[in-house]
Image: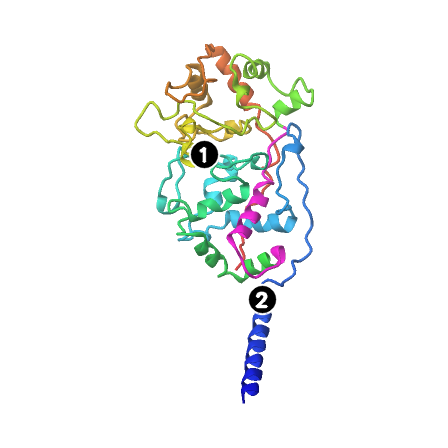
């Protein structure tokens, strides 16, 4: 009798194990469909070696296409009204033209939406650098109560799982039926890395040697940018950003101070510091600064020209510049010459997986 019970228990256990293996086989044992690797074409003016793709998230055409669909799909919000593209609009060089962005139920956040262009050349993401990689940035807004409106990322995953078309695409790309927020982040980040701007008139002049590519005013502006105006102390490299954080006095002249990077590091030296944005496509991505306070490039330069706004944590590189109005005009002309190519060909989806 004892042996029969043992045998029966063995049969029970083996049956349960078999069912579990069958379930897991259907869940995680699915093979990803062979995919076509994608190598981005880095245009004139940008450094291919600076383009960052994590080893655990190689770019493929299929993953990029999945990310494109996710980026534009308004159903991936609590009430089906907000997509990533709601704040990163192709028509506005993947920004939104607002001082601070509006999310679900027209709720406003406290900061402007930076352009999504050339994020593949950047390290820490967001104005305060709280996301170490583009994969982390890509999923952050979904769990924000004033952006996509989900309480957590589990709600996002559950929403995506409602659509068999998406489940099929994730299975093909990642080889699993168990969808995670990390999969979502990897797909959207892969798409975002295709949003590249280069081969601007400035690049054709500076790297291509075309003396007719920019105006004489822009040429004078270039000299100012790298000399008297001191712009290149922070806006350096081919993507015009040192990838660091600086306090330039924004918010210290009112009652709405944003502590910026300090909220992430809790380091006193980071109070009021924000990440140096790229100035590529800057003429297309107004308004400016993390709170969108400046409507024009002239206003931005005037802020620096007066030495920012004094405060205990002001970056020591921010000093009065003594630029003349003519020099400010030349500097603006140079910045406008950084309107590039490469991101305008993104196709906005009209159909989404059901």
Instruction: Name the residue at 60% across, 25% down.
Output: 237
Q: Position of residue 329 (x, y in %)?
A: 50, 15
| Element type at mark 2 | helix
Q: CA distance from mark 2 to mark 1?
A: 40 Å
In magenta, the rendered stretch is 172-199
Q: Note whether residue 349 is visible.
A: no
278 up-or-down from 64: above or below: above
Q: Position of residue 342 (x, y in %)?
A: 62, 35
- Please check the rendered image and state whether residue 5 is part of the magenta-colored stretch, yes or no: no
Instruction: Name the residue at 44% across, 12% down.
Output: 320
Q: What residue would you read off at disc 2?
A: 24
Q: What residue would you read off at disc 1?
A: 128
Category of crowding for the residue at label 2, using alpha-carbon neighbours closer than 10 angstroms: few (below 14), some (14–19), many (at least 20)? some
Q: In the figure, is residue 122 to the left or right of 273?
A: right
255 up-or-down from 181: above or below: above
Q: Which residue is more in the foreground, 331 or 233?
A: 233
Find the residue positioned furthest to the left.
Answer: 255
Instruction: Name the residue at 46% across, 43% down.
Output: 86
| Element type at mark 1 | loop
Q: Position of residue 311 (x, y in %)?
A: 37, 20
């Amino acid at each position: 009798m004892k042996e029969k019970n043992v045998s029966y228990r063995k049969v029970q256990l083996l049956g349960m194990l078999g069912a579990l293996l069958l379930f897991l086989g259907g869940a995680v044992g699915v093979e990803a469909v062979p995919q076509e690797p994608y190598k981005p074409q880095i245009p004139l003016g940008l450094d291919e070696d600076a383009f960052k793709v994590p080893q655990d998230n190689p770019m493929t055409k299929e993953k990029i296409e999945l990310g494109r669909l996710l980026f534009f799909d308004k159903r991936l919000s609590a009430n089906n009204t907000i997509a990533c593209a709601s704040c990163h609009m192709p028509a506005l060089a993947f920004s939104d033209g607002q001082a601070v962005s509006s999310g679900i139920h027209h709720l406003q956040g406290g900061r402007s939406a930076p352009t999504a262009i050339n994020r593949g050349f950047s390290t820490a993401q967001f104005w305060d650098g709280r996301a170490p990689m583009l994969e982390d940035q890509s999923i952050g807004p979904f769990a924000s109560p004033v952006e996509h409106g989900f309480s957590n990322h589990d709600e996002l995953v559950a929403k995506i799982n409602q659509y068999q078309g998406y489940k099929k695409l994730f299975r093909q790309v990642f080889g699993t039926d168990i969808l995670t927020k990390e999969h979502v982040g990897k797909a959207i980040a892969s798409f975002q890395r295709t949003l590249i701007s280069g081969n601007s008139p400035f690049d054709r002049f500076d790297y291509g040697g075309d003396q007719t590519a920019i105006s004489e005013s822009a040429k004078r502006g270039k000299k100012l940018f790298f000399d008297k105006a001191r712009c290149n102390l922070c806006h350096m490299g081919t993507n015009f950003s040192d990838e660091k954080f600086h306090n330039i006095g924004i918010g210290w002249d009112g009652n709405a101070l944003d502590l910026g990077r300090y909220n992430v590091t809790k380091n006193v030296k980071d109070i009021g510091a924000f990440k140096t944005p790229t100035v590529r496509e800057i003429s297309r991505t107004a308004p400016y600064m993390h709170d969108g306070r400046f409507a024009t490039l002239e206003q931005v330069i005037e802020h620096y020209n007066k030495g920012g706004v004094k405060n205990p944590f002001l970056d020591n590189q921010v000093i009065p510049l003594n630029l003349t109005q003519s020099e400010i005009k030349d500097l603006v002309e140079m910045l406008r010459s950084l309107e590039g190519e490469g991101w305008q060909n993104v196709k906005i989806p009209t159909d989404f997986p059901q």
